[in-house]
Amino acid sequence: MLIYDYATRYCLRNGGSDGYLEQLQVFLRRLPWQVESITTAQVDQYLTEALKTLSPTTVSNHRRYLTTLAHAARRDGLAPDFKPPFRRVKSRIPPPKAFSRAEISRVLARAEQLGGELRGCPRRHLLSAWILAAYCTGLRSGDLHSLRWDDMRGNRVYLTQHKTGRAHVALLTTEAQHSLNKIPRRQYVWADYCALNTMQKWVASASRGAGLKGNTKTLRKSSATYAAILGLSPQHHLGHLTNGLAEKHYIDRALYDEETGRHSVALPEITSQAQH
């Protein structure tokens, strides 16, 4: 079986998103490998050759895809010699950047300027509620978009996360609840009005209008960062299963230090002291 076909089957079997499946398929079109005969040496050779023409970040992503498929294929008893770990690929990971609360207020102000209606609901209400809910719950975009009204119990959101398959609880702030109450109730909070990519474009546009660079994932990083500032577990807050993932990829350390007052004092000056 071609690794392309196996990856497609794996992704569909495990409920992978359409976006993830597309990324896998685009990558694996270049690898006419039979999954049963793949070896670790073969993967290492590919990664070495790929680094000559592709960026380290791209090759690092390819390594991650192949590692995931290797574990799955071995569980299925298909590839005894397809064994991680594969050779390391060093890539620069940019530090996470989140919106501060003041910046989110600026994005909200732009959201309130959005005109028009969808199915009788002003678009500004949909966008403002999304921004506040994304910030306070830290939910992934797909989970937030598929949120139903009956997933809410007072100020609590109780749902099964699509990516992990685990039950998760998130808390709504009072202002988020007030904003949500402006949306006429159908079955789904947002999905009954617009597609996910439409909402993502609106958030990015409102961010640009506020003079900021960010998107709905930036709001998730803000949520994780402010959870850490409060002394909460960012991992639990975001619903991650992997230890350390939130701290590495979602906590804006500069914002964290600014809000908590850490690293607020610079070291003593050198030249001014020498003049005395």
Image (cartoon, rainbow, N blue to C red):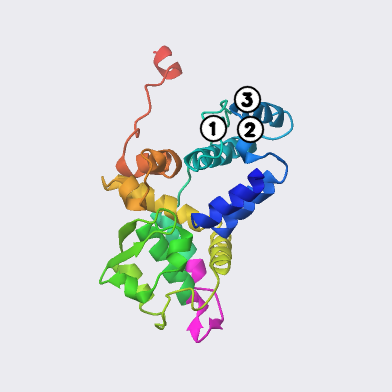
Q: Which amino acid type is marked by label 1?
A: Pro
The answer to whether 168 is drawn above or below residue 54 in the figure is below
Q: Position of residue 86 (x, y in %)?
A: 56, 28
**Quick one: label 1, few (<14), some, or many (20+) residues within 10 Å?**
some
Question: In what quadrant of the picture does the C terminus appear?
Answer: top left
User: Of the residues tagged 3 and 2, which is closer to the observer?
Assistant: 3
Q: How many marks?
A: 3
Q: Check disc 2 and report its element: helix, strand or loop.
A: helix
> Which residue carries the number 2 mark?
56
Choose top left, top right, bottom left or bottom right for residue 153.
bottom left
Residue at 31% across, 66% down: 157
Return the residue nearer the eye: 144 or 121: 144
Q: Amino acid at mark 2?
A: Pro
Magenta span has 89?
A: no
Q: Are marks 3 and 2 in contact (CB under 8 Å)?
A: no
Image position of 128 (left or right of 197):
left
Return the x and y of residue 115 as percentages of the image width and height: 56, 78
The residue drawn where x is 59% and y is 56% is: 19
Q: Amino acid at mark 3?
A: Ala
The residue sitting at 35% across, 56% down in the picture is 166
Residue 116 drawn in magenta: yes
Q: Which residue is mark 3?
A: 41
Q: Is 79 positioned to the left or the right of 226 in the image?
A: right
Query: Camera-side residue: 273 or 174?
Result: 174
Q: Are marks 3 and 1 in contact (CB under 8 Å)?
A: no
* Residue beneath disc 1: 80
Q: CA distance from mark 3 to mark 2?
A: 19 Å
Would you say residue 213 is visible in this rendering?
A: no
Q: Identify the magenta region.
A: 109-124
